[in-house]
Image (tube, grey):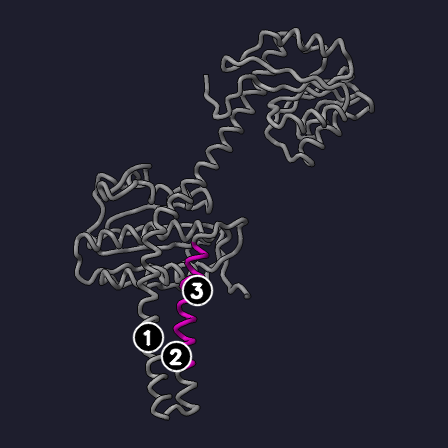
Amino acid sequence: MRDCCYTPDKWDVLIVDNEIDILNVTKFALFNFKYMDKKLNLINASSKAEAMEKLKANPNISVAFIDIIMEENDSGLKLVEYIRKELNNYKIRLVIRTGQPGDYPERKVIEKYEINDYKSKDELTEDELFCTMTTAIRGYCDLIMLEYYKELEHQLIQDSKMSSMGEMIGMIAHQWQQPLNLMSLITGELEMSHSSNNLDVFNFESFINRTYNQIHYMSQTINDFRGFLKPDREKKLFNVKKSLESIFTILDVILKQKNIKYALNSENNYLLNGYETEFKQAVINIITNAKDVLSEKIIEKGFIKINIKLINNEIIISIKDNGGGVDKRLLPNKLFENYITTKGLKGTGMGLYITKHVIENSFNGKILCKNWKRGAEFIIKMPNVKVGIISD
């Protein structure tokens, strides 16, 4: 038996019908029903209005059996539209039941309404009810599990961001050190010029411009960092080259501190549609891994090179380093598995796993790693690329 991350004491099931006999027969037929060793909590409603109140009071109803004809000829179908469109509930499994299938043909109802099953009342024997209920709750569990895993994957991405946040704050502190020192020197020069009466308009404007340049640089650093941490709420077009440049703005000081040079080359302004912060996270994971390898191996003249080009409407991003390459036993696929790390106790084994997940699931792309004669090369391929410039 499959598992389900939502495991109540009983399964809430709504029975909507204005015929008391039908309600009683249904309750009797399902009295001993169990799924995952849990019985049903049957909730009755005899009208659309009453069903709406029961749905509001019980948000975890897993299955609803709905009669079409009640106070109005299409009350059940209006209830279906209320559940799907107004409550925006697409998890609950909806089974339409009718005693007059000729008035509402099965095919037309299924084509027009977001229902999961259609049954005539005269075919709902005890065995038929058992099979229908089992299938419905099983489908409900599948949706709950899918929602759970989506949330878990999102949390993994956010956790990965937070785990690297401390290092990034350190990078910002390094990046701000130089402009702060420069502004301190500028302030000292300004004070000396003023005290010696050498502060003319030209010198004053020069001091102001130099100070503003440093402030702008520091402000840009914070904006890039804020953009990295802020999750995207919706997909949008973004410039791939500018997105990668903002990554290097964040990583610039720490790479220079490790004597690692970097280069970014792009043939054009390529635009991708998707979650830009997730894309940045995926690439940062690769660059950070390369930085760690180059630093640990004390590679002289270490470098990270990124090349962007378009082939057959696919953007190809190559990220290459000269860190000696990856253990062949981890290629081509094992490197991207969960909890696989090349950093020993220092690594979590999550970075490249999340990178692969983002590239494949958020962008419908592919990622692979191979060795070249001096190091490793990660190749990212993503379809549906546009060429152009996004207007501000």
Characterize the local packing of mark 2: few (<14), some (14-19) or many (20 or more) Cα atoms within 10 angstroms: few
Query: Which residue reaches farthest right?
Result: 72
Q: Residues within 10 Å of mark 3 (few under 14, many from 20)?
A: some
- In this figure, which residue is indicated by the disc labeled 2? 210
Is residue 339 toward the left or the right of residue 81 in the image?
left
Residue tagged 1: 182
Task: Answer whether residue 112 is visible to the viewer in this image.
Answer: no
Residue at far front of view: 195
Whichever of callouts 1 and 3 sits on the residue coming sooner in the sequence is 1
Image quadrant where residue 332 sits: top left
The structure residue drawn at horizontal position 79% and vertical position 26%, both measured from the top left corner, is 74
196 within the magenta span: no
Query: Percent x, y for residue 83?
Result: 68, 31
Location of the C terminus (image quadrant): bottom right
Q: Which one is in front in this view, the residue at disc 2 or the one at disc 3?
A: 2
The residue that appears at 43% across and 46% down in the rendered structure is 365
The quadrant of the rendering that contains the N terminus is top left
Name the foreground residue: 244 vs 258. 258
Question: In the figure, is residue 45 to the left or right of 166?
Answer: right
In this picture, which residue range is highlighted in magenta?
Answer: 208-228
How far is disc 2 from disc 1 in space, using C-alphas? 9 Å
Q: Which kind of residue does numbered mark 1 sit on? A: Leu
Residues 222 and 324: in front is 222
Q: In the structure shown, which secondary structural element does the residue marked by tag 1 occupy?
A: helix
Verify CB contact (< 8 Å) between mark 2 and mark 1.
Answer: yes
- Residue 226: x and y, percent? 45, 57
